[in-house]
Amino acid sequence: MSAAVIVIVFSGLSAASSGANGSVPGLLSMLSAMRFFLGIGVGAEYPCGSVAASEQSEEPAISYHARHRWLGLATITTLVFGNAVASFVPWVLYLIFGPDHLRAVWRLSLGLGIVPALIVLLWRLNMDEPMRYKSDSMKNTRIPYALVLQRYWPSLLAISVIWFILDIIVYVVPTPLGWCDSYLPTDTRITGGSQDLKIVFGWNVVISLFSFPGALSGSLVVDYLGPKWTLVRHSLPYTHTPTRPVDPGIHIPISNRLHHKRALRPVSKSQPPLDVIQSTQRLNTHVPTPARLTHHIAAFSILYGLFLTFAEFGAGLCTFIIAAKACPTAVRGHCFGVAAACGKAGAFGGVWVFPPIVKAFGGAGSVRGNTGPFWIASGLCVVGALVSVFFVHPLTQEGIEREDREFRAYLEMHGYDTRRMGTGTGTGTVGGSSSASASASGTGSSDGNGDEGEKRGDEGEKAV
């Protein structure tokens, strides 16, 4: 609930930002500060919401064969739908207020963020904790971080690397027109020669909508393929989607293209539709690449949209699911937060790294300057797929329960007193863990040695 309160407070303060005596620099300074603190709240919501959803997905009321599906629908599908709504809101507000009242547009666009956060806060006031949290959390005891890292550091590192790569590609690489400041924003052919914000916001809505079908369809099939192999199998078409529209073969003479069929073959069954649309990009090969993109912006938008669809179908969806279920309940929020932070670090670092890369490839106005980053993105996707293959364990439908049981046994083997795990408000431990805990700590409720056993457990915890 604290995260929701932070989002509510600083969304309101962002909308109310103002500089001293109407100063624009002061306004921007306050807005930056408020958005920083708002980011803390959103960052807290990432692990809280996703971990709670993962634990709820294994409640008895959820169908055994649809647990990953509901987790995907509750997390990444909802997230990308929210992104589309966030793009739609300023467009509608602009249509309402017009170009003469932009202050109302941007202040309301920021301030309306209070509404969903307030709904979440009110819902959480009556929300019950999941069964897994009641039985296996470490709310009332010390977390043995050394033991946790000893057991889970390979999985945590693998998930963090995958998320790091994913956010580099999603937030930095797939915006070739974004870094071509040599002809944008002064060149407005991409919007039909118009600088009207109505058209700019409209294009933003169209592009944002492409992510939703990918996340939705991925959620519906992930239970059949498994999160790990859904991630791996759908990373490859994702890697090649953007490279083709931005480099439609200008360096290959038309007479020699028949000798390059291998390079034009689809990389998976998901790829042929992209090749059909790609054919539109092979027109006007005498025109420089940036101009061809703006002359065929509809085809480029579809290809870019499919790029986003594949991103959410595989990597976006499964990264959430794997990060939310790979670690035990006691430290699941910690691990998810670390992985998510690594992802945002990738996005932040990529913003600084890729402009020099574009320059090294020949600049934003050259063919290589536009295509080079995409080849790097393809290589990063391959790296992410390999990390998934070798270091990510397949998740089963009862993965959380099994992981909690194994983690409890692991702690008991190292002398940790697991009887104090849980919130103390539920039905106790689940899956027979209470008996295992009692035997490991050498206690029993009927022999009168409970205090002695707890003392031994404390000594074992201190030793850890």
Image: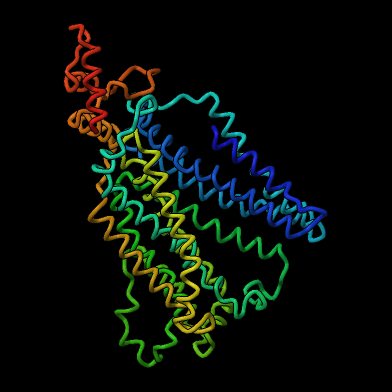
x and y, in percent, of residue 120 in the image:
56, 34
Query: In the image, is 137 to the left or to the right of 44?
Result: left
Query: In the image, is 412 to the left or to the right of 61?
Result: left
Q: Compare residues 150 and 365 and report the one nearer the observer.
A: 150
Q: Residue at x 24, y 42 (%)?
A: 151
In the rendered picture of this protein, how many numbered marks are placed on residues?
A: 0
The answer to whether residue 129 is above or below residue 37 is: above
The answer to whether residue 214 is above or below residue 434 is: below
The answer to whether residue 257 is above or below residue 129 is: below
Find residue 13 and report its image quarter.
Answer: top right
Query: In the image, is 18 to the left or to the right of 445?
Result: right
Residue 70, can we see it?
no
Q: Residue at x 30, y 64 (%)?
A: 383
The answer to whether residue 418 is above or below residue 337 is: above
Quadrant in which the C terminus is drawn: top left
Q: Compare residues 414 and 205 and report the one nearer the observer.
A: 414
Quadrant in which the N terminus is drawn: top right
x and y, in percent, of residue 171 in the image:
49, 61
Residue 282, can we see it?
yes
**How are the colours assigned in the image?**
rainbow
x and y, in percent, of residue 366 in the image:
50, 84
Find residue 378 and report its image quarter.
Answer: bottom left
Q: Compare residues 125 and 70 and report the one nearer the observer.
A: 125
Q: Residue at x 32, y 24 (%)?
A: 421
x and y, in percent, of residue 68 in the image:
36, 41
